[in-house]
Image (cartoon, rainbow, N blue to C red):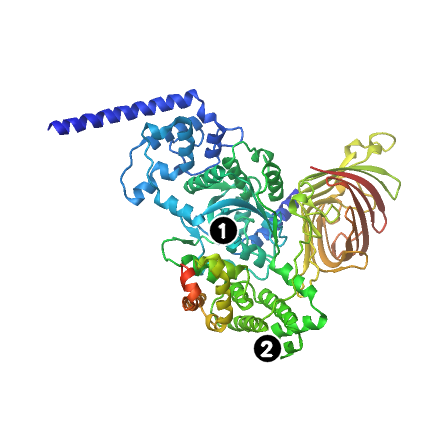
Amino acid sequence: MIALLAIAAILATDNTSAVADKHALIARSRELRLSDHREWRLLLHTEPGGDESDADSPAFFFSPEGKHDPQAELEANIAAFLEPLEGTSEEALDASAFCTFPARFAFLDGQLGISAHGAPTPSCPAYSKWRATLAPAGVTMIFASAFLNAPASMFGHTMLRVDRRDAQGQALLANILNFAAYPTTTNPFGYTLLGLTGGFPGRFSALPYYVKVQEYSNMESRDLWEYPLALTDDELARLLAHVWELDQTHFDYYFLSENCSYHLLSLLEVARPSLHLREDFPVHAIPTDTLKTTLASLSLRGPRLYRASHTRTMNARYQLMTGDEVRLARRLVESAEWDPGPLKDLAPERRALVLDAAADYHKFDIGFTPNQDTEAARPGRKRELQLARERGKTGADPPAFVVEPPTAEPEAEHESMRFGVASGVTSRGRIFGEIAWRGSLHDLLDRPTGFVPYSHIELPNIVLRLRPDRYSGEGRDAEHGVVLDRAALVSITSLTPHSGWVSLPSWRVSFGAERLRDLGNCDDWSCTAAMLNGGIGYTFASRFLGGEVWYGFFDLNVWGGPKLHPNYRIGPDVALGSAMTVTSFWQSHIEGKLRFDVLGDTRAGRWVPIVEVGQNFSLSPNVALRIRGSLWRDSAESALALFVYY
Amino acid sequence: MRKLLGVLAVSVIGLAASVASAAPYGTAGCGLGSIVFGDDAGIVQIFAATTNGTFATQTFGITSGTSNCVDMGRSASIDQEAFVKMNYASLMRDAAAGKGEYLSAMATLLGCEQPAHESLFQVAQSKHEVIFTENAEPVAALDSMKAEARANDTLKNSCTRL
């Protein structure tokens, strides 16, 4: 009885002292203004300069006000960490505040010493297992080059890889921390809308790097660049502890702003709170820009690595072979009957090369679907096996070669936004000016360093035309002193040169509004028309002039505007053109087009010839001078522009 | 005019989106406690939807796809199995050549000490016809590779996960 009373007394005191501890700690946190501490703000994912958290799940907060009130959340965390454990089962331990929010605990323990005030610090089975699985030795930022054939991948992609302690130098086995949206609809309209407006939940997951290599390098033919970041052990530990906390929440995914690149920056800020990376991206986060910001703030612990895509490696092997060897490799893949006989004429090293090249081409041909034993897949798999076995029989290594990147590293790209001023003259002797702004990213004439060669993507590009003469003199018409020349909301050109093995079509599409240039020198507001055009074509690369591509396109053009009678015009065209890198700072582009207006307004003449020429000189990576000239059937103009990239 | 613009806008965005959303894979978060490997269905789902990189399924450039989560505790060799399933063709090529990134990774997954890697490469090369057979399931190839390694005196003692 006495013993029972004693126990009851101890429990009571314990309880009282725990409550006293809690109040003291909360008071202390207020004194220290801990909820304003940068690390706390980062752990809660409050927006730079605000109180509201980006995290969108209630489970991420102990306080019902947590999303909007960092102080309330901090106090609720102190209380939660001081709670006694609810049992010793694995589930109970894993569910404890300590095991769910290890980074917050470390922060509060460092600032207030909460473990000394009775906060339990149990073992955490799930968290420990996860850490053991990752075996973290460091993190590497990965950049996947742009992929123009998927609308969402045109700006490249960044990922964070956790390198393994136990598999040094074996990147394939490391894990990617991936922030991904989980689409909740398959309806394309809803999909686009929700993707842009935060309608999909985004979550972090971890998956092996080899899955990503399959996806990017093999399936999408994208080169990967790897940047091993120099973080201290403490920083690495904090980063991972925090990623574990993010398992409790999702973030509404905004394609333009709160996307994967943005969230990766927030992880690096948690790792090193003195970094201010996200503040550079209040509106939109383009992956290359986030890469540049990261590299400007963090040093590397090892060399930058380049991992060539399957297609690029395949083409490099193609270049090493003679014409006969190429024909042989192709026959080994394409002939119905397996006949390795002709290989005997080759030296073992050449045989190995031909078989490696054939295996590359075969894989590209049948696709990268992991092996499934289906009736349809069997012939392809059988040939794959035959090629590999024959390769084994050579007993030799092929000649060594290095696959060079097609362009410089992505961080060497010019900046993603562009502002320009221009002045020009029309064939009727009128002087005009231009003011141009482009939100992103690159056209055929911009300095190509770092970009996918011969790619063009503009989102959006707006050009205003100034007519100074309209402000004075006889024909005074100030209302039309400034008119819209072009407003391409989206404009994309993908020129894929014939590569030897395979030939993919080139394509282009653009959409927006433009001044109808072919209605004489029409340049008031009524000359503006909505336009949509797109085409498919073929490109090949040559070295006649030192490295250029030649292309041909078949396009379809649609316009709608008040100056057209009736209000629209539809016409296909045939275009031929060439883009060239004359020197590293001089780009050249010429295109001739013959349009045939078939429907709607055909007053411009049934056949409309158009020629456009441009020469671009980069004065520095982010400043360029451009001369351009255009010729339509009954008018022409030329202009000189100055562009600044920022 | 404004109406026309609107119609054009919607059709272009719709076009782009229909390309982007060809196959929405991944319907729920995996949770970090499990490593996402993708089970068979998941792997098939990601890869079947793509043909030679013409129009990929990638959604908004961010999803990695599989929401197929594997609890690390389910099977002792789950990481080996996932690796072989996903990289069967690359592994088969590396084994024939007796070297390569995928074969090295396999040696690590089999728990082989670094000095023994070369022996595993030799076994994979010399026993290629036994390990990689026509219409073989990847996991069967894994099993026979392990059996061949166990039959090798060096590997038997220096690889811990055979």
Outermost residue toward the right in this view: A429
Task: Identify whether A497 is placed above or below B8.
Answer: below
Chain letter of mark 2 equals A
Please tell me whether mark 1 sits on a helix, a strand or a loop. Answer: loop
Task: Identify whether A417 is placed above or below B141.
Answer: above
Query: Which of the two discs, 2 and 1, sits closer to the camera?
Result: 1
- Judging by the rendered image, the residue that carries numbered circle 1 is A174
Chain letter of mark 1 equals A
Residue at image x 88%, y 42%?
A428
Using the rendered image of the protein, determine whether residue A403 is visible from the camera's viewpoint: yes
Looking at the picture, which amino acid does disc 2 mark?
A: Ala
Question: Is disc 2 in the same subunit as disc 1?
Answer: yes
Task: Give the camera-side residue of B123 and A426.
Answer: B123
| Mark 1 residue crowding within 10 angstroms, few (<14) / some (14–19) / many (20+) | many
Image-quadrant location for residue A287: top right
Residue at image x 35%, y 36%?
A97
